[in-house]
Structures are given as structure tokens and as C-alpha cells.
Amino acid sequence: MRLIRYSAIMLLLLALSAGAVPRYSVMYNQSCSLCHNDPSGGGQRSLYGAQFFAYTDLAMKPIPMEKIGTIQPMLNDQIQIGVDGRVQVYGLDSSGNGKTIEGITSMAMQGNLYLSFQLSPKWLFYLNKGLYAGFEIWGMGHILPFNGYIKVGRTTPPYGLRLADHKAFIREPLKLGMGWYETGVEIGFHPQQFTFAVSVTNGRDVAQSDFVADTKNKAVTARTDMRFPIGQLDVWVGVTGRYNDTSGERQAYRGVYGGLGLGRLCFLGEMDVHDSKPGGGATAKELCSYAELSYRIARGVLVRVEHNFHDPNLDAKTGAENMYVIGAEIVPTGFMQFIPNLRIHDLKGGEEYSGEDYLEGEVQFHIFF
């Protein structure tokens, strides 16, 4: 009965009202760099993404082409501004699992102000200040062959999918979620159907959200993917990896990701294995996965189902968790998005996941430019 009650609430929300979104890359068979200033995706949208794509392809009611010029992210010929803001209203049914009590509350999830400076046709300087402690600052020059670039500064290393949902199990459980920024150098290439990026940054202790005191040890992070058609099916496949050796612990990540696009239907997925070995300790092997199936009902209205899986230690009886998500994304206009979600948490016992299953309902209100 509880599941029926929550489902009814979410269906009502869908009837009333839907970031870095890799799904669009699959749907349109295009690189993330088409709509984002960061070639790896995420963060500030490019002029095409902010001015054209959001107001024509995404919005329920596109603006006429002759009015595109009224949407102006450029402060002048060299400086572009952008924003991302998310407010979430949510409620949980804890069912006695000790996580929280029943009730409805709200929180500001995200507040980012972006500034990019086009120093020359090939050089870009980028600033991203978050609502909380996070920030990015880097310079990038498209000076390498094969549409290649070199990026220097503080940014998110190129690992896997850059999902906007921080609750996805391929983000927070892996300690690669919100606020993950490192300082170093990144080199990448992104011709039309192929991308490759590798970064060398200061190593980071996964227990910390930012720098470590001992920066002698470095982290190497990389990802590569390609796109190709099979008949009417658009295919995107990629591999990713990371090695982070600090003075206290060795961290190794490896994963596969990609998607399938067939008209309005889209599949997106990633699976990661994380090995951690404390100094003098045994290696623990963690598994996280994410799978999403979405369907674009009409312009500006998309529904999706997701499955997330997390096993904190494949070699120990720590239990595991499945999270199933039923949601939608509704874009009434080119700067506004509603995202209702119903999350069903299925806990599989063990030492870490010893509570009862619980439900979580939420609605995100997203303003972007």
C-alpha cells in the first residue's frame, strides 16, 4: 500500500509538471563539447547549448528563430556568463532503518555561477564558483592536432559519465561526486566520432573532499570513447580508469560506460570497480553500476527508469543496495526544468546495509542558462 501511495503521488506530480546530461549526447549522437565549454561535459554551456539548443530542441515551446538573438549569454564579445541552480523538495519513508524520519523538507542542492573568457580564438579561461565550497579555475588552449586541447588548473578529472544526479551510485559511493575537483594538467582530443582525455593531478585521499597535504603522489585519470551507427541504432561505448596513490592509501578505478539511441528511446549505463588498499592492509573491491532507459514522449517531456547497484566489498559480507528510480524531466521553457523522482531503496543485509527498505520521493526545480 505504501508503494501504491507514493506512486500515486508521483503520477500526480507528473500530471502537474521534469545538468550535464550524457543522455543528450546519445540522443543526438554528438560529443559533449558541442553544448559545454568543458570538452568532458558538465559545467557552463557553450554558446550553442545556452542560446540555441536549450530554447529550440529542449523546450516544450521553442522560441522562433528570429528571436534567438534575444537570448544573450555573452556579456561582450569575449565574456560569457552562465548559471545552474537546483532546489529540491523531498520526503522519505524511513521504515525504521535509522537513516531519517518521515517528513517533507527542502534544500538548495546546487548554485553555480560560470564565467568564461575567450582570450583568443584558441584560448579559453574558465571560472566556476559553487554555492558551497567547490570551485573550478582553468585555462584551455585548443592547440593540438585532431581538435586537441591542453587544460591547466583546477577541474574535475575525466572519469566516466558526468551525471548531474549526485545520488547516482556511480558518483557519491565512489567518492567521485559533487565537489570533486583536482589541480593538474589534462590533455584531450575530440574529433567528431572519437574522444580521448587523460589528466595528471595531485592525489587525493578519498576520505577528504579536497586537497591532501602530501602532493608528491599523483593521480592519473583517463577516459576514451567512440560513436558509430548500426543501422538506425546510434552506439556509444567507452572505457575509463583512474589510479590515485597517496601516502595513506592506494585507489584504483576502472569502468565501462556508453549508450544506445534509437529515435526517442535511449539507454545509458556505466559500471565501475574500485580497489582500495590502505597502507599495510588488504585490498577491498567495490562495485557500482548505473543503468537508465528513457523515452521522449514529446518535445520537452521525457520519462525514465533507472537501476543503481552498490556492493561496498565484493569479498566480504557487507551487503548491497539496489536503488530503482522512476522519474521524468519536463522543460517548459529554455531556462527551466522540473525533475520529479520516486526512488525505491532495496537493501540486501550484511554489515553495512542492515536496515529495512525505504522509499524516497522528490521534485527538483532547476534553473539554468
Image (tube, rainbow, N blue to C red):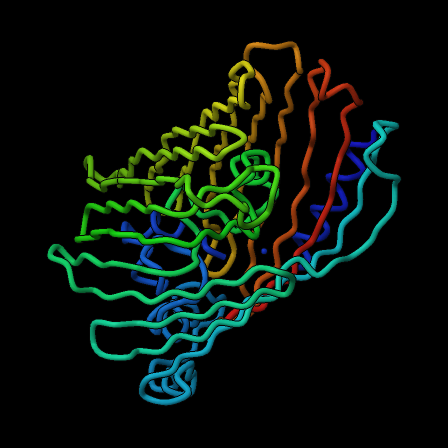
Considering only vertical position in the picture, is 136 above or below 199? below
Compare residues 238 and 343 and report the one nearer the observer: 238
Looking at the image, residue 2 sits to the left or right of residue 75; the answer is right
Q: Horizontal and vertical percent for residue 149?
A: 22, 59
Count how many numbered circles sit on residues in the image: 0
Q: Residue furthest left?
A: 145
Q: Residue 42: which quarter of the image?
A: bottom left
Which residue is painted at 39% across and 30% down in the image? 255
Q: Horizontal and vertical percent for residue 82?
A: 48, 74
Screen quadrant of the N terminus: top right
Q: Horizontal and vertical percent for residue 44?
A: 43, 66
Q: Residue 55: which quarter of the image?
A: bottom left
Which residue is painted at 39% across and 28% down in the image? 254
Which residue is painted at 19% across and 47% down in the image? 193
Looking at the image, residue 133 sits to the left or right of residue 120; the answer is right
Q: Residue 317: which quarter of the image?
A: top right
Q: Horizontal and vertical percent for residue 131?
A: 63, 65
Looking at the image, residue 181 sits to the left or right of residue 366; the answer is left
